[in-house]
Amino acid sequence: MSGSFEDLHVPPTLVSFACTTENIDSVISPEFKEAENFVYLLKPEENENGLPDCASIRKNIAKVHKLIHQGIIKAAWTPGMGGAAEALIKMIIGNRIGIDLDYDLNEEELFAYHYGAFVLETTEELSGALLLGRTCSDFVISKQDILIDMLDILDLYEKKLESVYPCNLEKTDRMINTVSYRKPAEFASAVKIAKPKALIPVFPGTNCEYDTAKAFERAGAESEIFVLNNLSPAAVAKSVEVFAEKIKESQMIFIPGGFSGGDEPDGSGKLITAFFRNPEIKEAVTQLLEERDGLMAGICNGFQALIKLGLVPYGKIIDTDETCPTLTYNRIGRHQSKLVRTRIASNKSPWLMNTEVGEIYTVPISHGEGRFIAGTQLLQNLADNGQIITQYVDLSSNPTDKIQYNPNGSDWAVEGLISPDGRVLGKMGHSERIGSGLYRNVPGRFDMQMFESAVRYFK
């Protein structure tokens, strides 16, 4: 690896990686887990050159591995150039669990280099290691009469690159309404089928088709991934013809996420939109929704396409204009990728039959254009009709405009919408990215059972 940027020059560099396999239940994360635990620095012995002794490192690694399997070690970090002090700060930030440093701790030990060492949170006392302190419920670092407020440290830490990549946008005065549509509704397709089929189109840049297919199959549906052939105009024409026929054989269409066409030119979802506006495909989609009681959904890039087509919130493919809602660039001006909390505002959809209004779900998002914009009257109409299905919420479960929780700055904190009859759904959060072993150190409820609900609709 080498390169230059302005006055910075990178020397030729070798980066190596090591990996292994492990039972998921024995994998731990670095943030402190609970108060009143012990915190230790486990250091290797040094050789005559002041370097970590390899035999000692192997011995410590075996010890750490054993204690993790026994459930004694709850969190671990390997110190870098910032020493144990840097490790402690980062372990504290995760769950805002502080530390009361040991009375006898030498402060120089905190900032010394300890390569090959571990900072460990344990439930029991540990022999052969240096006690750094005990975890505490307050978000502080304390020692005797010294108290460091970690909110100040966190603010300094996050501001380091604020001038380059601003995160703390100016607060708006917009009021965010909590939407709750609670009118009971039952959903059942007139077409009964034990194993409904979901058609999943793949465009250049789509990257969520496998997760989507897996989610459908886990729910009891059959899935078919259809890859658009765009090598030539003739190939595209053939893809249109074949896809239109496959719609007639399917009960659901699901447009997965990604970056179709590289989100070019000037905006996302345009390639998908152009494809679905083809008369053959438009007719097949209309027949699926209006004559065969079928379902349609799109996530992320798929939601962007559904909005541009008019399928949400209007329920059919239309020529959209300036009065229609849209999804545009995030307020922060760049891509956002994180886990967010969303609240069910309405379950008036076959896709949401297994949810209840008011439930909170944590979902991953990854997009640059997810900011939902609509006129105030249209927003109110959508809310009154139960078409706003999910809103971004803060830690108190309130819809918010704050960028930490509403990552794109959507009006009314809208994360997802449905058509008037609920059979077409679009949302930004990747509800298909669920599975055993994911998000191990993040509390919350992840599975909305969207796909199970859709299969149940056809039973």
Image: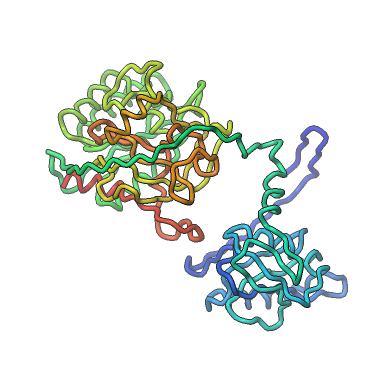
Q: Is residue 235 in view from this perspective?
A: no
> Residue placed farthest to the right in the image?
49
* Residue drawn where x is 60% and y is 80% of the image: 124
* Left or right: 348 as drawn, with respect to 260: left
Q: Is residue 88 above or below residue 42?
A: above
* Residue drawn where x is 25% and y is 44% of the image: 454
Total tally of numbered discs in the picture: 0
Q: Residue 364 versus residue 143: which sits nearer the camera?
A: 143
Q: Is residue 271 above or below residue 351?
A: above
Q: Looking at the rendering, in which quadrant would you find the N terminus? A: top right
Q: Is residue 7 above or below residue 435?
A: above
Q: Residue 388 versus residue 264: which sits nearer the camera?
A: 388
* Residue drawn where x is 77% and y is 34% of the image: 5
Residue 373, picture quadrant: top left
Where residue 120 appears, as percent x and y from the top left, is: 64, 71
Where residue 263 appears, as percent x and y from the top left, is: 49, 28
Q: Is residue 83 in view from this perspective?
A: yes
Q: Residue 156 versus residue 113: which sits nearer the camera?
A: 156
Q: Is residue 241 above or below residue 77?
A: above
* Left or right: 345 as drawn, with respect to 394: left
> Residue placed farthest to the bottom in the image?
127
Where residue 435 appears, as percent x and y from the top left, is: 40, 55
* Left or right: 419 as drawn, with respect to 291: right
